[in-house]
Image (tube, rainbow, N blue to C red):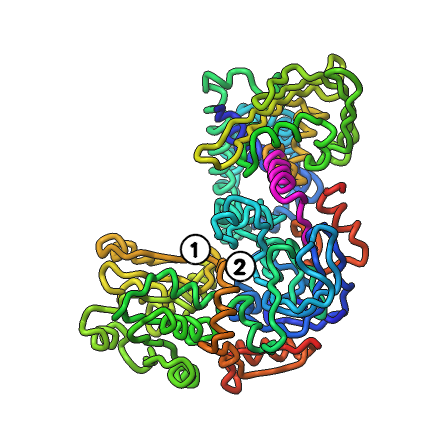
Amino acid sequence: MQRYDNEQARGEQLAVGLGWFSIGLGLAELAAPDVLARFIGLRDTSHTRSILRAYGAREIGTGIAILMQPDNPMWLWSRVGGDALDLASLASAGRHDGADTRRVGAAAAAVAGVTALDVICAQQLSAQQTDGQRVAPSRQTGVQVERVTTISRPIEDVYQFWKNFENFPRFMRHLESVQVTGDRRSHWCATGPAGMRVEWDAETIRDDENEWIAWRSLEGSDVQNSGSVRFTPAPGARGTEVRVQLQYTPPGGAVGRSVAWLFGEEPDQQIHDDLHRFKQLMETGEIPLSEGPGLWRAAQPASNPEEIRRIAGVHR
Amino acid sequence: MKANCWHGKKNIQVDQVPDPKILNPRDAIVRITSTAICGSDLHLYNGFVPTMKSGDVLGHEFMGEVVETGKDVANLKVGDRVVVPFPIACGNCAQCQRELFSLCENSNPNAWMAEKLWGYSPCGIFGYSHLLGGYAGGQAEYARVPFADIGPMKVPDDLDDEQVLFLTDIFPTGYMAADVCGIQPGDIVAVWGCGPVGQFAIKSAYLLGAEKVIAIDRFQYRLRMAAERAGAETLNYEQVDIPEALKEMTGGRGPDHCIDAVGMEGHAPGILGAYDRAKQAMMLETDRPAALRQAILTCRSGGTVSVAGVYSGFVDKFPMGAIVNRSLTIKSGQTHVHRYMRPLLERIQRREIDPGFVITHRMRLDQGPEGYAIFNDKQDECLKVVLKAA
C-alpha cells in the first residue's frame, strides 16, 4: 500500500493555499500600498509605498511559482525568506516616529503565524522529496489514488457489474458515458475539473475472472490514465473487498489540479465518493438521493427533481 | 405544502415549499397526520448542530398515510397508515443485517461530511442537518420516505396517532437506553434528564425489571411528571447533592446503571458548569457533558453508563480514569428504531404502556415556531409538543 497519495495531497493543498495567499497579499501591496501601510500602522510615505510595491511584486512572483509547482519545496522556502524580510522591515519601521506600534505589533504577529505555516509546508514537501519512494514527483506520474470498500455481495456479482464498463457512469460522478467499442476497447467521456469535457479511448489490459480488471488509455489520449480494480473475499462472509487504483495526468497539469482543489474536487475524495455510490448501487439497487446534497441547497423538496439529480451528479 | 423550516438560531418559520416527489424506486410519499418536536430538535433550534442550511425542513418524528409508492416498494400501498422510524436504513448493508439500523452504510448521501467529523458515517436522518444526509423532515404536510420497503411500519386502526406516534423515536430511544444496560433483578437505575426520552427511559427500565428508578432534573414539574406518570423517585440537582443522595438511596453502592438523557446542552451548577459554557461559547468544546460526567462518577463500580442524549462533537474533562479503574461500560448510539418498533407496538397493544402520557401540548402544524419556543423555554410546563398536520 502506498502512503503516497494522502500525505502528498495534504502538503500540496497547504502549498496551493499559501500560493493564493501570496498572490492576494501581493496584489493588495501593489494596488493599494497607502491603505495597507495605514492598516498595519506604518507611516504612509513615498518610501514606505515603494517598499510595499516591491514586496508585492515579490509575493506575486512566489505565489505564481508555488501554483505552478505546488510540490516543489523551494518556493515555500523562498516564502519563509520573504517572511523574515517582512518581519525585519516591520521591526525597523515600528521604531520610527508616527508608527502605530499596536497595529505594527498585530501585523508582525500575523506574519509570524503565516511564517509558521510556510515552514510546516516547506518541511512537509521537503520530507516527501527525500522519501526514497517519492523521488519522482507527481510531474511524471500524475495523480495516483487507491481506495477500498467492502460490499455485502458475492464476489461474482461485484465482478460482473464492474466488468461491464458501461455501468461506470452510474456511480462515477464525472463520467458521462463509456461505450464498449470492440474487443477490449472502450470509448470514455468525462467532465474534468472546472467543467472541462474530455474523451479518450481505453483498452482492457487485464481481466481475471472474479479477481482483477485493469485498463489504460490508448496512446495519444487527452488524459493519460489507467486503472485497476481487485476483488477479494472479505473475511467471515462479509462480502467482497473492492480495491480501486487510478492514475491520471489531470488536464492543465498542476494548475488544473490547484483549480480542482479550490472547487473541492480532490481526486482521492472523488474516488472515495464514487466507491460509496458503487456500494449503494450494489447493495440497495439505487443511489439514495436527499433533498439537500452537500451544502448546495436547503433540505427541502425541489419543484423539479432533476435539479437534485444534477447537483448530486446522479445520472439515472 | 406547508413546512416548518430552519432559518437560523431560534428562527423557525412556516414556509410554503414544493410537495415532495419520488426520487428513488424505494421511496414512498406520506401525507402526515401527526408529527412531534423532539428534544434533539432543540439542539438544531439553539444552533448547536453544524451543517444546517437556511430553509431546511425540520422534523424526524412523524406518521401518516401513504399516498404514493416508488416502483420497488411492494409491501406498502396507498392508504396504509404508517409510523416512520427517524433513522433511514437500507436493510441490505452489513450493519442493517446486524440490526444496527442507525449505522446503515448506504443511507447518508453526504457521508463524506460525517466522515470528516466522526471518522465514519452513521445513517441518514430526516430533517437533521446535511451532515446526516440533508433529508427534508416531517414537520410538514408531506414527506418523502426513502427505503420505504424497510422503514415504515403499518399500525392498527384501533390505536390512535398519539398512542403510536412516539414509536418513531422517543419511545424506542428511551427503551434502548434501558435495554443496553442489561438490567437484572434488584438493579437500581438513575436517569439524568426528565424530558420525554428520560420519561420513556424510566418507564422502560421498569418494564425491563428494574427495582427502582431515580430521576434527576432541575425542573420541578418534570420531576413531578416522572414521579406521577412514570413512577420514579426524584432528585432536584439544584436542591440536593446528587452523588451523596444517590449513595444514600442505593445503600452506598451507587446506581447499577446510569442513563444520560440530557446530551450536549447539559446544565451544571457551579464552576464546572460555567467552565463548559465558556468553552462552548469560545468553540473550544462543542458539547457540555455535565450530566454525563456525573453519571460516570456516581455509577456503581462495574456498572453501565448508557448515553441516549445527543452529542455532536467533543467534550472536555471526561472522567476516563473512573471508567478504566472502576470497570464501567459505556453504551451509546442513535436508536436502532427498526429493531424496536414491532415489539414496542405489541407492548402498547398489551396495554403495558400508553406512550401518550408525555404529551402536554397539542398544536396545529403551522404553530410549529411557537411550539419550539414553548418547548425550549419550558413554558407552561411543557414536556412534549405534538403538531397535528391533518
- Residue A268 is left or right of residue A312, and the answer is left
Kindly report the secondary structure that dominates the magenta region of the rendered protein.
helix
Q: Quadrant of the C terminus of chain A?
A: top right
Residue appearing at x 71%, y 65% in the figure: B66
Q: Percent x, y for residue A89?
A: 52, 38
Pointer 1 indicates a residue of which chain?
Answer: B
Q: What are the residue bounds of the magenta stretch?
A: A271-291
Q: Amino acid at mark 2?
A: His
Q: Secondary structure at mark 2?
A: helix
Mark 1 lies on residue: B314
Q: Percent x, y for residue B182?
A: 33, 61
Q: Amino acid at mark 1?
A: Phe
Q: Nearer the viewer, residue B304 or B118?
A: B304
Q: Residue furthest top?
A: A219
CB under 8 Å between discs 2 and 1: no
Q: Secondary structure at mark 1?
A: loop
- Residue B235 is left or right of residue A33, and the answer is left
Mark 2 lies on residue: B338
Crowding near pointer 1: few (<14 within 10 Å), some, many (20+)?
Answer: some
- Residue A128 is left or right of residue A248, and the answer is left
Residue A200 circle label: none
Q: Is residue B95 above or below residue B306?
A: above
Report the number of numbered marks.
2
Q: Nearer the viewer, residue B66 or B57?
A: B66
Residue appearing at x 40%, y 75% in the figure: B203
Residue A79 visible to the viewer: no
Residue B138 visible to the viewer: yes
Q: Is residue B10 above or below residue A136?
A: below
- Asked if the stretch drawn in magenta spans residue A153, the answer is no
Q: Quadrant of residue A284?
A: top right
Pointer 2 indicates a residue of which chain?
Answer: B
Q: Percent x, y for residue B94?
A: 51, 44
